[in-house]
Image: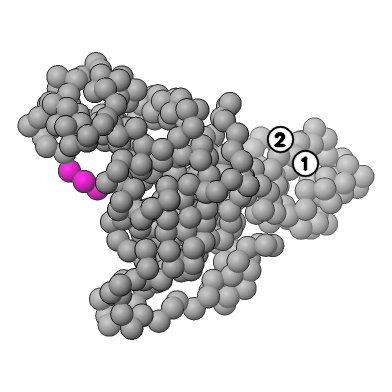
Amino acid sequence: MNMISTDRNAAPVIEVREVSRGFPDGDGGWITAVDRVTLGFQSGEVTALLGPNGAGKTTLIDMLLGLSAPESGTIVVAGTAPRTAVREGRIGALLQTGGLLPDLTVKETVRMIAALYRDHAPVEEVMETAGLTDFAARRVGKCSGGQQQRLKFALALLPRPAIIVLDEPTTGMDVTARHEFWERMRAQAETGTTVIFATHYLEEAEQFARRTVLMHRGRVIADGPTAEVQRKAGAANVTVTWSPTEDDLAALPRIASAERRGGQITFRTEDADALARHLLTATTAHSIAVRPASLEEAFMLLTDGVRADGQDGADGVAAPVAPAERPATTEGASR
């Protein structure tokens, strides 16, 4: 994929500094959804925001869009407060929530929202970009979930935003529609638009994002180029053709798991070099192939590795801290 390059030394288009946000848990306690997060996003950067349910992704996205305010810390979007950036059309969003008027047609909906902006992209242009042209006359209530997601994408493009935030953008789309959506997003990113997206389809992050931010229990536990996050998990898969005995298997160094398929065995290991060396020199194994952990495997290893006892489960992964106490006040919190 040929994405535009980004200058990591340039001023970030979004700055998140020591931001925290929590909510009552319903039992008189307090849940810290986002815990002292610091992040910067560059112009033209494509970032996947990943994490298990409850990791804090949606809460962080809500704060980026000014839908809620931090209890502590600051967020600056395109040089201003998040709500101002949204009002001025500097940032657009495609969210899971937010209803559409079912009785309007697709084109009527785009025209209606376009009228809210002083300056906006041509209606026909955003409809073509979002892939709406073929069902422009269809009533929104008759559109599939994937088609409604495309419509929301078109609405996000209307103000010509420098930043687009996507929360589970391909929910409701089939495989073909997802592929077409990401082709359109690639084209958008190549124009220099900053793209931040949360998804539970990890293959989308692996294929599309140059950077991955992994959240767990409100904190960032991994952040960097997607390939580096995969390597950070410290695991690799070694596949061999071999018929080992129990003694052979017991002698293998640092094996996390093994899976047999036909005459091949795939081992997951924290030290692929040591395992491959042992297989080559001390066994009859052949056709040895080594590949790094997939992003999905890295995701599982890194999140499973952050244990409740506060210890790191994988090298270099930040251990969680005890949830912050409920703040004395939430009024006047810094944005």
Q: Residue at x 58, y 26 (%)?
A: 2
Asked if marks 2 and 1 touch (Cβ < 8 Å), the reply is yes
For the stretch drawn in magenta, the main secondary structure is loop
> Residue 101: x percent and y percent?
11, 37
Q: Residues within 10 Å of mark 2 (few under 14, many from 20)?
A: few
In terms of depth relative to the viewer, which is nearer, 119 or 18? 119
In terms of depth relative to the viewer, which is nearer, 242 or 146? 146
Is residue 38 among the parts visible in the rendering?
A: yes
Numbered circle sitting on residue 263 = 2
Q: Residues within 10 Å of mark 1 (few under 14, many from 20)?
A: some
In terms of depth relative to the viewer, which is nearer, 146 or 39? 39
Tell whether position 97 is magenta: yes
Q: Amino acid at mark 1?
A: Ser
Q: Residue at x 27, y 46 (%)?
A: 87
Tell whether position 192 is magenta: no
**Residue to which mark 1 is pinned:** 243
Part of the protein shown in magenta: 95-99
> Residue 148: x percent and y percent?
23, 33
